[in-house]
């Protein structure tokens, strides 16, 4: 937006547990392609050690699940975070005219991988 024309940003997330946990992000997406939101690099690192990158990945905020135009929320596991605080930084990789739109962060159990519009879902496929 006008206050951040470069479209990059960061948030701090806290893992209050005493074990590593999955970090999932929810963000706006559109479809079918092309998305109005840019492909965006996500970098996660401990709060006081930017040199110790926990994960680096690219999110593509687009869906191909619908034949008609949609504006939805996608949820993706982006990292495993250690106990304590971590920084989640995003950098757009293209200019689509709209910024990357983070809608939620969640520190969840290691068995939670991703989710839909309502956030994280558990994977119960191991029950057979």
Image: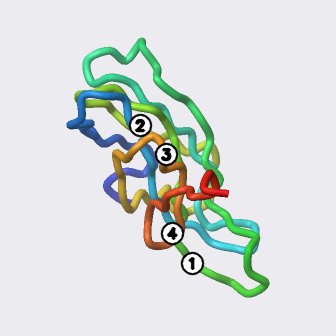
Structural crowding at the residue carrying mark 4, measured as other residues with C-alpha within 10 Å and reported as few (<14), some (14–19) or many (≥20)? many
Residue 119 location in percent, x, y?
Answer: 44, 65
- Mark 4 or 1, closer to the camera: 4
Residue that carries the numbered disc 3 in the rendered image? 111
**Horizontal arrangement in the rendering, residue 3 relative to residue 66 (left or right):** left
Tag 3 and tag 1, C-beta contact below 8 Å: no
Residue that carries the numbered disc 4 in the rendered image? 73
Structural crowding at the residue carrying mark 2, measured as other residues with C-alpha within 10 Å and reported as few (<14), some (14–19) or many (≥20)? some
Mark 3 element type: loop
Mark 1 element type: strand
User: Height in image: 96 above or below 18?
Assistant: below
Residue that carries the numbered disc 1 in the rendered image? 71
Quadrant of the rendered image containing residue 102: bottom left
Q: How far separated are the C-alphas under marks 2 and 1? A: 23 Å
Name the residue rendered at 45%, 40% in the picture.
110
User: Height in image: 18 above or below 109?
Assistant: above
**Horizontal arrangement in the rendering, residue 16 relative to residue 125 (left or right):** left
Mark 2 element type: strand
Of 120 and 34, nearer the camera is 120
Residue that carries the numbered disc 2 in the rendered image? 89
């Amino acid at each position: 937006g006008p206050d951040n024309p470069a479209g990059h940003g960061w948030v701090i997330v806290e893992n209050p547990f005493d074990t590593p946990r999955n970090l999932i992000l929810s963000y706006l997406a559109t479809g079918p392609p092309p998305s109005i939101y840019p492909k965006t690099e996500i970098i996660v690192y401990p709060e006081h050690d930017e040199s110790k990158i926990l994960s680096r990945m690219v999110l593509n905020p687009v869906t191909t699940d619908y034949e008609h135009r949609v504006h939805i929320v996608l949820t993706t596991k982006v990292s495993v975070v250690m106990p304590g605080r971590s920084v989640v930084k995003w950098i757009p990789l293209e200019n689509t005219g709209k910024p990357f739109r983070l809608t939620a962060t969640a520190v969840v159990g290691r068995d939670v991988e991703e989710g839909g519009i309502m956030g994280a879902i558990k994977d119960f496929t191991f029950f057979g």
